[in-house]
Amino acid sequence: MKLRLRTPASEDPGARMSEMRTAVIGALVVMLGPISMSLYTPAMPAMVHAFDTTPAAIKLTLTVYFIGFALAQLVCGPMSDAYGRRPVGIGFFAIYLAGSVIAAAAPSLSWLLAGRILQGIGAAAGISMSRAMVRDQYSGQQAARILNLIGVMLAIGPAVSPTLGGVILSTIGWQAIFFVMVLYGSVAIWLIAFVAPETNRNRDRALARPAAVLASYRTLFANRTFVATSLLIAMSPGGLYTLAAILPFVMIEKVGLTPTQFGMGMLAQTGSFMTGAALAGVLLRRTDATRLVPVGLALVALSGLGFCIGLRIWPPSFISVMAPTALWAFGNAFIMPGATTAALAPFPRIAGAASAVTGFMQIGGGLAGTAVAALLFHEPFNSLRVIMPVMSVIAIGSYAWLVWRGGGLVTTTPTGEPARRPDPTGGRDALPPSGTADDGHHDDAHDGHARKTRR
């Protein structure tokens, strides 16, 4: 008699998670990045004195974190296409864990910068993996609903992080904030190693070769619809990261809040995002996700006007700064599900690479805004009045180009299958050879036809 052992879910490549389980695991791993930023932002002014340095030098800890976070996604995405989501996730989260330990014990600013860049590299796997795991299992409205659920749960971490960071700073000290990150990094490794199943059923080690990686990215950037959608994601959702870097200095030094008050005040932004995501979740039951995008962009436009004009009419205060901030967050809750689903839909075989690029663009947009604020503006308050309106204009322009080109965004074809290019062989096997990334590279005529007929 033969005994048959049941394969654990975490080792079963054919396992498919429910929408809720996918959303919960996706949110927990993707929160690693935002929490690692927002948890210690209340401590940034105090760290200026702790390291006897300047605000610009402490801002650099955010910049190097953004750089590691953005660039590492371009590596972990293709690697997860080649080797699977789980082993790559475990490896990158281990890097994050090491960076957290270094930052917690940093004796100087140089060591702190080293720890922060390692944290950024390790946390990059969270955003890349979560979106790829969704695309591995779902597309269309199902994918949009899951991404919206991730958004709702994702808002909880950054909501409590500034408050928690302010309390830890006031009671224990800034080093303890990084020990909390050590704990979270350990939980993330356990989650991927023992709870999450492997969702990538098309692993191909050839995709990790440099030529194949370049082919994947060439496929993505040759698709102008993907590029425009990624630019929209970079400027609108990416703007939230720029706000996270600027607001601590504006609210604490200009408005006059204490770190604890600032942490409590940030609940206005997160609560606005959660409210928007909850409303979007209700609307997604009967409305195509892409129809919510222009609504969100209209709110972002109003927010941009608030930063540009409102902050020139009224003096800096909690209301004058946080009102447009909350409106920006609310609008992005409508934008992210449809825009992200539309960007990933045509690329099921290189979902990791596609997810990496959208994540890179989102973080890169935040990094670009932060870099401009640090380099061109001596006063953070002035940068807030210029950079955020410019980012809103670029986001709206990207969507306007998509509409002019063929009707806007599309997440599925009329049959409900992911959008793909026509079969050039007339029905014969048109799959690209192993090691190349050809899916999703459809021509402009088909792009326009898919949009016009998606319903």
Image (cartoon, rainbow, N blue to C red):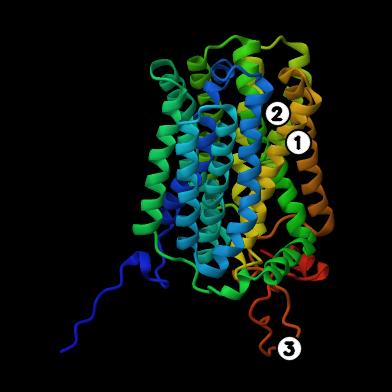
Front position in the image: 123 or 396: 123
Under circle 1, the secondary element is: helix
Kindly identify the residue that appears in the image at 76 percent across and 71 percent down: 442
Q: Which residue does the numbered mark 1 point to in the structure image?
A: 392
Between the C-alphas of marks 1 and 2, the distance is 8 Å
259 sits to left or right of 334: left
Q: What amino acid is labelled 1 in the image?
A: Ser
Q: Is residue 424 visible?
A: yes
Q: Which residue does the numbered mark 3 point to in the structure image?
A: 426
Q: Which residue does the numbered mark 2 point to in the structure image?
A: 303
Kindly identify the residue that appears in the image at 40 percent across and 63 percent down: 197
23 sits to left or right of 387: left
Q: What amino acid is labelled 2 in the image?
A: Ser
Give yes or no for contact between labels 1 and 2 (Cβ–Cβ under 8 Å): yes
Query: Could you say where residue 190 lies in the image, as x and y percent from the top left?
Result: 36, 52
- 197 to 121, vertically: above or below: below
- Closer to the chain start, of discs 3 and 2, is 2
Instruction: Answer few, some or many: residues within 10 Å of disc 3's Cα (few below 14, many 20 plus, some between 14 and 19).
Output: few
